[in-house]
């Protein structure tokens, strides 16, 4: 009962902070709201007893990717003066396109969504079970994705190295 | 919910909170005394006997100062910044096992607030969000020196987080568990991890210095270049919280080093005791180790000069990370060989 209440409140807060990401005017505030959203999502994972996924979500998204976002935005130093005037026809088209996308996704997921209580006590999200699954059933996709990551890293280093900078 | 458990955990939280703050407060006094001793001075000796009331005097002074918020700053973020710093410094104390279970009123009480089965990953998580306090505070001040300090701090923390994480994998491999309780229990008596993983300890120690922004890694508040670094615009207790968070995180990372490498509450000859005697001796042993590390932290600060920024990045990316990876590979191979996988 208490868990259900917590999950409903948490869900509301997640959606609220996610809305604030797109509603807030300032880009840095948007990023900070996104970080908060990730924390709430981790809260949902903990409610589902998936502690490993919850903490990895925080480490990777809130701790690494969002820090880089903030980094770039702070260096860009966007001011309200520099902001371009909102182009009304473009925003109108964007709304239509986004709405159409939402409709397609909803239609696709229509049968998949069941509005029952999602709090299930399962141990899938614990480290041992997840590790066993990753290294037995899903070992091929796991290895392929790691190769993908390494090639992306090598590519990034190569791109950064290509132009030699001469600093006197 | 068990009411007794609730009371027990709540009182434990309050005690741990007070101890963390108390140790941090007296670390400031101890640091000044130590600096004075190293530099052949006397140090604070006016407030109370031997200057023992100095931390309280400092605290009162901090509260009495004018609380100033710069005109063009982002007000809310400016206020939140020091709060996040303090929060991330304190939150790690929840997973630290302070001692063996103690028995009060016939109840077995674990001296640990929460035993996650992902304890070490929790530390990584907290370390990785620790950079937000400095970053938000530095950016919201709307001052170029603050911004420089914040950017330096965050790039430094991101770089050293990697080496720290990779070095800790060896400890996980040795213990076979992510839980801090299991890691401490596996180091029973004198069977400490430091004897198996000296290289790992060295890497972790250097990274802790960098993560707590202590000298020689305190480029974020490098006075000679950046005025005051990320807290240039801060005053009153907000500045106090930033400075205090450094001492709290120093205490917590000393405690972590004691747990991960020096056996936590384990001490040689612990099998001769049991019950509450063991618990009290264990807690004493744990705090002795922790205070030794705090001493080493301060000793280093007053001995070694600050790094240059490129030296810092070279050390992080070109020395520590390769060393950590090689150490991890060797450990993994030895363990696999030991288990007969070849």
Image (spheres, rainbow, N blue to C red):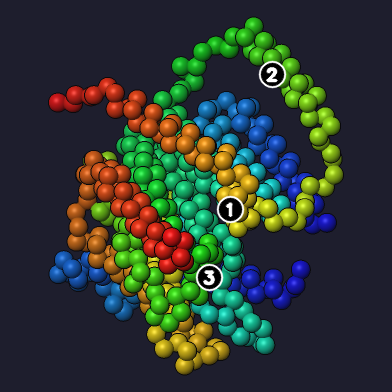
Q: CA distance from mark 1 to mark 3?
A: 19 Å
Residue at position x 62%, y 40% from top? A37
Is B7 displayed left or right of A155 in the figure? right
For residue B182, the mark is 3
Residue B32 sits in which quadrant?
bottom left
Given this view, does label 1 or label 2 mark the residue nearer the observer? 1
Q: Residues within 10 Å of mark 3 (few under 14, many from 20)?
A: some
Q: Chain of mark 3?
A: B
Give the SS element for disc 3: helix
Give the SS element for disc 1: helix
User: On screen, B122 above or below B80?
Assistant: below
Q: CA distance from mark 1 to mark 2?
A: 37 Å
Given this view, does label 1 or label 3 mark the residue nearer the observer? 1
Residue at position x 70%, y 36% from top? A15
Q: Chain of mark 2?
A: A
Given this view, does label 2 or label 3 mark the residue nearer the observer? 3
Measured as percent of width and height from the top left, residue A5 is found at 79, 51
Measured as percent of width and height from the top left, residue B63 is found at 44, 57
What residue is shown with label 2? A98
Is B303 displayed left or right of B341 in the figure? left
Q: Residues within 10 Å of mark 2 (few under 14, many from 20)?
A: few
Residue at position x 62%, y 79% from top? B109
Question: Considering depth in this image, is A34 or A65 the residue closer to the camera?
Answer: A65
For residue A131, the mark is 1
Q: Of all residues shown, which one is farthest toward the front? A: B342
Quadrant where the N terminus of chain B lies?
bottom right
Residue at position x 61%, y 85% from top? B103
Measured as percent of width and height from the top left, residue B233 is found at 37, 42
């Amino acid at each position: 009962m208490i868990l259900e209440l917590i999950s409903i409140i948490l869900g509301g807060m997640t959606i609220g902070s996610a809305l604030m990401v797109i509603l807030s005017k300032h880009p840095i505030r948007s990023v900070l709201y996104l970080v908060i959203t990730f924390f709430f999502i981790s809260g949902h994972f903990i409610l589902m007893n998936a502690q490993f996924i919850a903490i990895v979500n925080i480490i990777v998204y809130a701790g690494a990717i969002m820090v880089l976002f903030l980094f770039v935005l702070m260096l860009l130093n966007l001011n309200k003066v520099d902001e371009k005037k909102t182009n009304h026809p473009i925003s109108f088209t964007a709304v239509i396109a986004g709405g159409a996308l939402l409709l397609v996704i909803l239609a696709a997921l229509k049968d998949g969504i069941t509005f029952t209580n999602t709090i299930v006590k399962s141990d899938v999200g614990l480290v041992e079970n997840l590790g066993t699954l990753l290294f037995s059933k899903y070992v091929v996709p796991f290895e392929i994705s790691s190769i993908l990551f390494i090639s992306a890293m090598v590519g990034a280093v190569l791109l950064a190295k290509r132009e030699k900078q001469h600093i006197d | 919910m068990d009411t007794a458990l609730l009371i027990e955990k709540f009182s434990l939280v309050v005690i741990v909170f007070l101890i963390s703050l108390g140790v941090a407060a007296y670390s400031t006094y101890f640091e000044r005394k130590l600096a004075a001793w190293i530099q052949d001075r006397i140090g604070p000796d006016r407030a109370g006997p031997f200057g023992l009331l100095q931390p309280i005097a400092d605290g009162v002074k901090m509260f009495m100062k004018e609380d100033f918020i710069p005109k063009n700053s982002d007000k809310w973020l400016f206020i939140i910044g020091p709060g996040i710093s303090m929060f991330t410094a304190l939150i790690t104390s929840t997973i630290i096992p302070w001692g063996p279970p103690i028995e009060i009123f016939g109840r077995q009480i674990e001296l640990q607030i929460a035993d996650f089965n992902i304890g070490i990953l929790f530390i990584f998580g907290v370390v990785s969000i620790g950079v937000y306090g400095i970053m938000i505070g530095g950016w919201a001040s709307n001052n170029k020196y603050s911004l420089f300090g914040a950017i330096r701090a965050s790039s430094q923390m991101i770089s050293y987080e990697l080496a720290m994480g990779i070095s800790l994998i060896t400890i996980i491999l040795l213990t076979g568990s992510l839980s801090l309780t299991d890691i401490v229990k596996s180091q029973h008596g004198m069977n400490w991890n430091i004897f198996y993983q000296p290289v790992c300890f060295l890497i972790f120690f250097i990274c802790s210095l960098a993560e707590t922004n202590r000298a020689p890694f305190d480029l974020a508040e490098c006075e000679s270049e950046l005025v005051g670094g990320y807290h240039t615009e801060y005053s009153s207790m907000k500045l106090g919280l930033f400075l205090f968070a450094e001492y709290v995180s120093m205490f917590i990372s000393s405690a972590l080093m004691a747990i991960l490498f020096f056996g936590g509450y384990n001490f040689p000859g612990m099998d001769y005791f049991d019950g509450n005697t063991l618990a009290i001796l264990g807690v004493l042993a744990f705090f002795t180790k922790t205070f030794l590390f705090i001493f080493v932290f301060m000793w280093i600060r007053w001995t070694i000069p600050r790094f240059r920024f490129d030296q810092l990045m070279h050390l992080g990316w070109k020395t520590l990370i390769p060393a950590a990876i090689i150490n991890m590979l060797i450990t993994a191979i030895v363990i696999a060989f030991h288990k007969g996988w070849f």
